[in-house]
């Protein structure tokens, strides 16, 4: 496991190897204190309705106070929310991306294989975005939609963006069928090299979701040196939650950004 940060509210964290300017961001690990189940470190799914998830979300919010923390309830689609205009720490905002346009705001979402993506720009004023990107979101253009919104409404130059793709599933662990292959393949910047056929399972491929995300950023002029990718696959690492490994009942990690 790559280097982790000290705990926050009892949760061990993964941070980008290179800090992002003006932004505090991290993903929580699935590990729990001695004698606890790893599910006790879970933040639930998009709604976070279980008692454990609600308790953990409350602990995290208190640790970040007085900065208000807003959660996303995920759709696996392409809806973008914005803070502070839509700020509502008392209940989640439904969507798969959130933009922070002012200091003193924090946002979070949950994952257990999908890509948690963080973007930050500091020129001329700090601006950040947090994206949830599974194969459906990548196919629907969630990355392009966020970049377009940042460019048009926040005067962000994409070449100045810094990006972190947090803990997610990697190609060796992510098999898809024909429908997903067709939809992803039709998305901008996706190339045949992002798929590896399965000789023993005709009609199935291994899909490189982090590679697809990187290609989309490159198409918008973001230098590869500005994109950090967490090197381990969620399915292969027991310290991370993975639906592909453990099923839908597994826990969820939280990825959090706070604009200082």
Image (cartoon, rainbow, N blue to C red):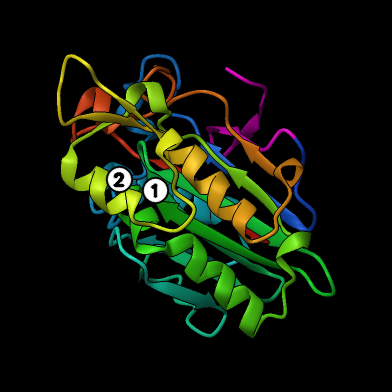
Q: Specify few, some or many for label 2: CA neighbours under 10 Å numbering under 14, 14-19, or 20 or more.
A: many
- Tell me where residue 110 appears, x and y as whole percent: 39, 48
Q: CA distance from mark 2 to mark 1?
A: 7 Å
What range of the chain is rendered magenta? 1-17
Quarter-wise, where is residue 245 in the image?
top left
User: Disc number at residue 44?
Assistant: 2
Q: Secondary structure at mark 2?
A: loop
- Tell me where residue 194 appears, x and y as whole percent: 43, 36
Q: Residue at x 28, y 48 (%)?
A: 45
Quadrant, the N terminus: top right
Q: Residue at x 48, y 57 (%)?
A: 131
Quadrant, the C terminus: bottom right
Q: Does the CB distance between marks 2 and 1 fall below 8 Å?
A: yes
- Tell me where residue 175 appears, x and y as whole percent: 26, 29
Q: Nearer the viewer, mark 2 or mark 1?
A: 1
Q: Residue at x 48, y 70 (%)?
A: 145
- Give above or below for 78 relative to 37: below
Q: Residue at x 58, y 63 (%)?
A: 129
Residue 68 in view of the camera: yes
- Give above or below for 249 relative to 72: above
Quarter-wise, where is residue 252 in the image?
top left
Left or right: where 133 falls relative to 54: right
Query: Nearest the camera: 55 or 243?
Result: 243
Residue under circle 1? 110
Q: Secondary structure at mark 1?
A: strand
């Amino acid at each position: 496991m790559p280097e982790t940060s000290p705990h926050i509210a009892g949760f061990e964290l993964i941070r980008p190897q290179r800090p992002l300017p003006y932004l505090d961001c991290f993903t929580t690990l699935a590990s729990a204190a001695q004698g606890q189940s790893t599910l006790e470190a879970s933040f639930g799914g998009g709604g976070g309705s279980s008692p454990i998830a609600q308790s953990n979300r409350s602990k995290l919010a208190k640790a970040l106070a007085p900065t208000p923390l807003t959660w996303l309830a995920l759709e696996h689609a392409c809806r973008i929310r914005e803070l502070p205009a839509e700020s509502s720490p008392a209940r989640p905002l439904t969507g798969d991306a959130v933009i922070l346009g002012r200091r003193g705001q924090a946002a979070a979402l949950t994952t257990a294989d999908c890509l948690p993506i963080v973007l930050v720009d500091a020129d001329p004023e700090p601006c950040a975005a947090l994206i949830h990107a599974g194969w459906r979101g990548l196919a629907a253009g969630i990355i392009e939609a966020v970049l377009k919104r940042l460019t048009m409404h926040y005067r962000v130059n994409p070449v100045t963006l810094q990006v972190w793709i947090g803990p997610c599933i990697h190609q060796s662990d992510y098999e898809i069928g024909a429908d997903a292959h067709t939809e992803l393949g039709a998305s901008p910047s996706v190339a045949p090299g992002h798929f590896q056929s399965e000789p023993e399972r005709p009609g199935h491929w291994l899909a490189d979701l982090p590679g697809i995300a990187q290609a989309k950023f490159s198409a918008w002029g973001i230098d590869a040196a500005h994109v950090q990718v967490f090197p381990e696959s969620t399915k292969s690492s027991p310290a991370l939650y993975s639906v592909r490994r453990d099923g839908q009942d597994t826990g969820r990690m939280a990825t959090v950004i706070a604009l200082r």
